[in-house]
Amino acid sequence: MVPLSEHRRLRDWKVTPLRPADIRAERIKPVMVISFHCKRKQCMKSTALFLLPVFILLVFVSAGCLSGSEPITTTAGTPLPTQIPETPPPTAEPIAVSLAPGPTQTLPPQYYVEVQVEKQNQAGVPTITVTFRGGTGMAFTEQVNIQVTRSDGVVETATMYKPKVGDERNLKGTANDDRVEVSVLVATGDSYTIYDALVPYQSINP
């Protein structure tokens, strides 16, 4: 089926037949010369319709070439690791200890309790024993804290929680004088140092 646009083009064509006299004069076969007379606008339109597919084809070809090309990648050099200077291990500083006894405090009457401190030889080892003896303020005694500063500079601690009469703590001592400190923590949160003295070593056979 001929499109409508072709009908319009054929409508503008003009057919000019050759006359017999022209055929004899030119000695050519009778032919029909078809001269195409098209309007200027229609010819331009036909040219544009012909070039449009060519232009679209070129666009697709160009797009295919660009998409098929591999992107150029640049490899950056591997950075060298930063060397962090090593931190020297901390040096333990010796803790200053004192063997000199300090002042003691007197417990208020309602908090009054007593302790007994002695150092004896137990199985060949000098041992400091602190014994709780009770008192009127025993019900208000929360803790009895003990600290022993030995003559060799070693510090040891021990604690009695809610002590009862006869409770004791044993700490290792030396054959020389060792400092013993005993403090009592009462129910109000106050702490009282009730004992601070040097305890000598007592041999079994003086």
Image (cartoon, rainbow, N blue to C red):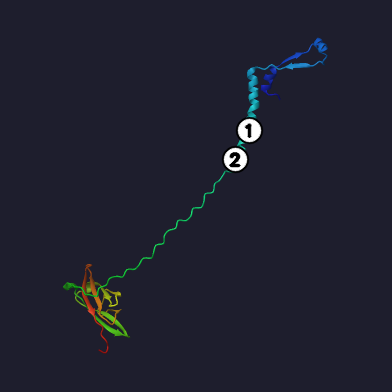
Q: Is residue 16 visible?
A: yes
Name the residue rendered at 70%, 19% in the picture: 10
Percent across and percent down for residue 187 are 23, 69
Q: Label 1 amino acid? A: Leu
Percent across and percent down for residue 112 are 19, 74
Viewer-closest of 131 and 196: 196
Identify the element where label 1 is drawn. helix
Q: Is residue 54 left or right of residue 120?
A: right
Q: Quadrant of the C terminus?
A: bottom left
Viewer-closest of 160 and 181: 181
Q: Which residue position holds label 1?
A: 58
Q: Quadrant of the N terminus?
A: top right
Viewer-closest of 115 and 137: 115
Q: Which corner quadrant of the image does residue 69 belong to?
A: top right
Q: Which residue position holds label 2?
A: 67
Outermost residue toward the top in this view: 21
Identify the element where label 2 is drawn. helix
Q: Which corner quadrant of the image does residue 59 belong to?
A: top right
Percent across and percent down for residue 49 are 64, 25
Name the residue rendered at 61%, 35% in the picture: 62
Q: Mark 2 Cα within 10 Å, few/some/many (few <14, many 20+)?
A: few
Percent across and percent down for residue 139 are 22, 73
- Between the residue at mark 1 and the residue at mark 2, the CA separation in whole angstroms equals 14 Å
Give the answer, above or below, for where 48 lies relative to 18: below
Q: Label 2 amino acid? A: Ser
Q: Is residue 126 left or right of residue 105?
A: right
Outermost residue toward the bottom in this view: 205
Name the residue rendered at 64%, 27% in the picture: 51
